[in-house]
Image: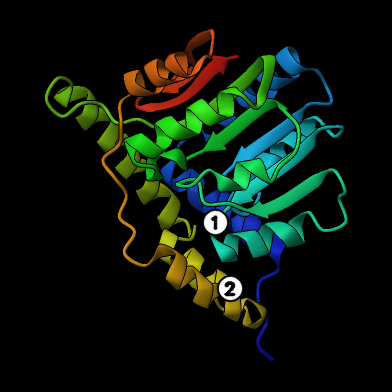
Amino acid sequence: MTTYPSSSDLLRRWDAQQTAYIRHRDQRFTVMVEAIARQCGRAPRVLDLACGPGSLSAALLAHLPEARIVAVDKDPVLLAIAREIFAGQDTVSVLEADLDQLDWLSGIDGVFDAVVSSTALHWLAPQHLAQLYFALADRIVEGGLFLNADHLLYDDIAQPALRGLARQDDEANQERAFGSGTDTWDQWWDAAQSRLDFAAAAKQREAVWLGKIPPAKVTLGYHLETLRSAGFRQTGTIWQYLDDYVVCAVR
């Protein structure tokens, strides 16, 4: 009899796969969770943008069990996994949302103490990212936080040596991880979509991502200046490893 992976197993494998592409991913999460605890208290209301299968939300709950989380994503398969992961937890809502649009935000009541995202906002074109930042500024309490962990590549022209160092580090990390049996991106998706009960979600996923090409990544400076223009009083970075950052903005 064929055994299909459970959502908890898929989440574990997702975390390993993502760590193959993002060295020190766990440090990112630790820094973000500790910043929220210190700035927003032990029971914050948090919006998790492009939550995937729920990694960052799970990390928040592990350290801040009284947190209330709204986790959003547009990928049907990832949403299906996240909904199983958080089934029965009334402090977590998992909702469908396309960050290229803003209509989903009007369907969520109230304000947030923190808004977070990890390795996702690079999928947004600059104009959509700016629209999102301006919309979020009105939904975060005064003194609340916006935190975005992502790869923000060094400039090919101005920083070629630094970009080369970061690329070599990424390649070495991936070689070590994949050589020890960690799923690649494609292998993980093959496993996730092998679930018969995810067949409908997998088909929907094809339509959601049809023709979608990642835009050119914007610079760290673009994130910081756009957040300031949107109304965040302070912007900066609270963690960095090579070209991997946690951007932080205080409302």
Precedes in sequence: disc 2 or disc 1: 1
Q: Inspect this view and state whether residue 110 appears.
A: yes
Is 160 situated left or right of 80 in this image?
Answer: left
Residue 237 in percent (x, y) is at 47, 15
How is the protein colored in the picture? rainbow
Q: Which numbered disc covers residue 74?
A: 1
Q: Which numbered disc covers residue 201?
A: 2
Residue lying at 62% horizontally and 76% vertically, measured from the top left: 198
Q: How far apart are labels 2 and 1 at the CA level?
A: 11 Å
The image shows residue 196, relative to residue 118, as above or below, that is below
The image shows residue 175, relative to residue 201, as above or below, that is above
Residue 226 in percent (x, y) is at 40, 20
Foreground of the two, 7 or 138: 138
**Looking at the figure, which quarter contains the C terminus?**
top right
**Looking at the figure, which quarter contains the N terminus?**
bottom right
Callout 1: SS: loop
Residue 80 in percent (x, y) is at 66, 65
Foreground of the two, 111 or 175: 111
Residue lying at 26% horizontally and 40% vertically, measured from the top left: 216
Residue lying at 64% horizontally and 42% vertically, measured from the top left: 106
So how many labels did they put on this image? 2
Residue 228 in percent (x, y) is at 45, 13
**Disc 2 marks which amino acid?**
Ala
The image shows residue 124, relative to residue 157, as above or below, that is below
Furthest-left residue in this view: 157
